[in-house]
Image (tube, grey):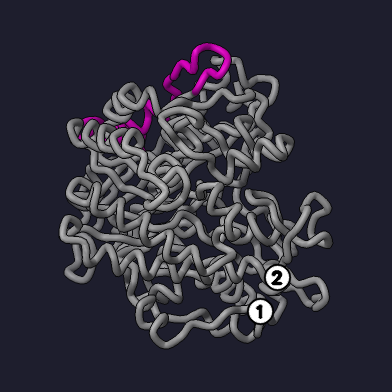
Amino acid sequence: MVSDKFPVSGLLLLVLIAVGSPAMAAGPVCPKTKVLSGASFPDGFLFGTATASYQVEGAVDEGCRGPSMWDIYCRRFPDRCNNDNGDVAVDFYHRYKEDIRLMKRLNTNSFRLSIAWPRIFPHGRKEKGVNKIGVKFYHDLIDELLANDITPLVTVFHWDIPQDIEDEYGGFLSERIVKDFTEYADFLFNEYGDKVKNWMTFNEPWVFSRAGYDTGKKAPGRCSKYVSDKCQEGRSGYEAYIVSHNLLLAHAEAVQSFRNCQKCKGGKIGIAHSPAWFEPHDLADAQAGASVERVLDFIMGWHLDPTTFGDYPQIMKDVVGSRLPNFTDEQKNKLKNSADFVGINYYFSYFSNHKVKVDPSRPSWQSDSLSEFETKSAQGYNIGNKPLTAVMAVYSKGLRKLLKYIKDKYNNPEIIIAENGYGEILGDKDGDLGVALADENRKYYLQRHLLNLHEAICVDKVNVTGYFVWSLLDNFEWQDGYKTRYGLYYIDFKNNLTRHEKESAKWYSDFLKKQTNPSPVKSEL
């Protein structure tokens, strides 16, 4: 089994501790409990799982759905999608009722989903046709969630832009996207706003812009040749900033539409950001502290500063210069305070190493940030522990530190952990259920992160109101295809997409039972 390869002390959490801190008027109220469980968190806290339309739905040629940018990208460059299972998908589209039953078994009270733009507007605009089948599918899905007392959190855009828009004017490379995106978002708000009260306009704008238009690792796969010879076209150091600028303008207009939507009254809306946490690479380096602050501005402040304060971080304007677009005063006013909460997708941390030499003739987001991401410090220390099959190192303290940083810098906003999860590649053991279902490392990951989340809320008084595990199901992980598994439930792609409960799912279910005593967690982890 996978866990047998690691020190027992790193996996067994056997020390009973008291958790819960006295409530303070200035922060969240945390109940006192003998062990850490769902009951240890403030009343009304959202606990759920997350998925995304393109990653789980399948049925790409059914129900009048139009082609997505990712459909075309993976067909043109199948090697970049690492899809060993061909056209096999998770098929949430047909099996959502079955999967909602899995959510109930987990005892979750919320579920994060996204709505596929090509399934609503197959050709990218309302005037070119609204897909009634797609509209009904999401009504049925949302109704089924509500019937099971599960609160939906809906993402408007999780990277699946209609290919027709991409072909016509380059999607988010053009400011024309602002009008089309706002029309699409407005349609969703008015169609589902009486049922859905929690919304996010965009998922991970940093990843979408950088990986799609600066490194070329995700669709549409654009970058300069000096970054990757796999990119057929693109301009690193330029396009990512243009794309994010248009994305932010689209967000501001969509939020204005949301706030004018009568059906949406009482709802809230934000963006799901995807920062890592960073520690200084070398404490002897005078740039150590500045490097961490700078990279956080580039990775998170890039999109969070405008939606909080109305403009980009000053360090970005200073370093990027004329390559960074400018907002008008009107745009700044629309952007300022345009998020009711901050969504955070947290997975990992790095050491930030100050980069001294930069070639101005080969610009990129990475070189602009003047940093390199390192997994070891200058003294050779690892950033967390990395099991042999893990996609990334586990550093749960980074979550607590990141949340405290956001509280202090961004005026103590409401925060929702929109994604947090453990990825693993099982290789030749992938089809062995005995190995795949005994995911002790994922269980350990969730325990450590939920403890640090609890301490952030109850000790640091960070205003976190929800936590969503990525992911409910093993799914299509973009350029990693299906070989990387994040699910609480195992998908058997070789045998009728059968769902199998992993040990992590059992633990999460126990954790959320109010009257049970789940495994305690060490306070020092």
Mark number displayed over residue 323: 1
402 or 94, nearer to the observer: 94
Residue 478 locus on image (x, y percent) = 60, 41
Q: Which stretch is magenta?
A: 491-520
Q: Are marks 1 and 2 in contact (CB under 8 Å)?
A: yes
Disc 2 residue type (three-letter):
Gly
Query: In this picture, is 429 found above or below 266?
Result: above
Residue 425 locus on image (x, y percent) = 64, 32
Q: Residue at x 22, y 51 (%)?
A: 193
Q: Quadrant of residue 314?
A: bottom right
Is 9 left or right of 125, judged from the image as shown?
right
Secondary structure beneath label 1: helix
Mark number displayed over residue 412: none
Observer able to see residue 235: yes
Observer able to see residue 12: no
Residue 110 locus on image (x, y percent) = 28, 41
Mark toward the start of the polypeptide (1 vs 2): 2
207 or 355, nearer to the observer: 207
Secondary structure beneath label 2: loop
Residue pointed to by mark 2: 237
Q: Residue at x 48, y 69 (%)?
A: 303
Q: Residue at x 24, y 66 (%)?
A: 259
